[in-house]
Amino acid sequence: MYLIYVDESGDPGLQSSPSSYFILSGIVLHELRWNSYLEQIIGFRRRMQGKFGLRVREEIHAAAMINNPGNLVRIKRNDRLAIIRAFADELGSMHDINIINIVVEKNGKPLTYDVFSMAWKALIQRFQNTITSRNFPGPMNPDERGVIFSDTTNSKKLTQLLRQMRRYNPLPQQPNFGLGYRNIPITSIIEDPSFRNSDHSYFIQTADLAAYLLLQRINPNSYMYKKGGHNYFLRLDSVVCKVAAINDPHGIVWL
């Protein structure tokens, strides 16, 4: 069984939105690696507690740590950035994970364009395709399936979307098969999505980190650019799912 933990950066709105991009990042790991990677993250958190005073149970929410740290204001801003950098390096060392990244560039999209649904459709399709093609790293069983864990989002809409895709999932024909679409239902993803508060899930926090670093790679804020944080996404290069989009060097799916 493959588990995917998903979080977003930016927002899916097209009108009066503060962001030109909506990003989904999904951390994929096999069930047989879940416990060992959880222990690795806990070990990392203990090191951050010893070095910077970040308590093991305090959430690493990347955007907030930079600009709206709340109780973490007690930690110097440069140290909060160092925690984010170290977290990226830790994630990049987990060689049996893969990160699927979807980017919707909202500029120029018609108001009828459903940013949320289109991004999630792309992520779900790549998750299924990579499972069925047996392209994820690490252990695998003869007939794998996947399950989705998401940060709290539009749960009703996402659940309905996945249920619909299990019955109707039209994809463009390949050029050698002619014009039109083929219906390729989602068959490798079981159950409805399961929703987690990020402050209760270390793996959702890793997805939050990946999505934030990708946004900073594309459209960095002034602080991240000044400090070189716009390049931190590249620290994840060894674990990004490059087969998700072969026309992008980092496997990013652009919509």
Image: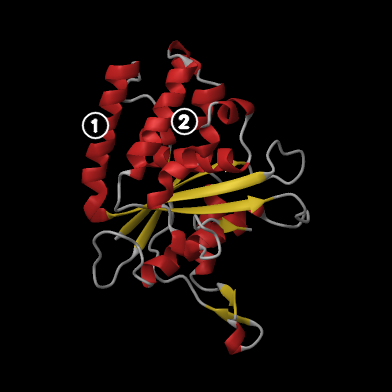
Q: Residue at x 44, y 22 (%)?
A: 80
Mark 1 residue type: Gly
Q: Is residue 16 left or right of residue 24?
A: right
Few, some or many C-alpha atoms within 10 Å of disc 2 (few <14, some 14-19, many ≥20)?
A: many
Q: Position of residue 206 (x, y in %)?
A: 40, 40
Q: Is residue 10 left or right of residue 42?
A: right
144 w.r.t. 59: above or below: below
Q: Residue at x 33, y 38 (%)?
A: 90
Q: Which residue is mark 1?
A: 43
Left or right relative to 214: residue 75: left
Outermost top residue: 74
Q: Is residue 195 visible?
A: no
Q: Earlier in the sequence, mark 2 or mark 1?
A: 1
Find disc 2 in the rendering and name its residue. 61
Instruction: Report the number of numbered marks.
Output: 2
Q: Residue 245, image x and y in percent?
A: 52, 63
Other residues around mark 1 within 10 Å, as few (<14) / some (14–19) / many (≥20): few
Disc 2 residue type (three-letter): His
Q: Secondary structure at mark 1?
A: helix
Residue in the image at 54% along x and 67% along y: 164
* Relative vertical location of residue 108 with respect to residue 207 in this rendering, above or below: below
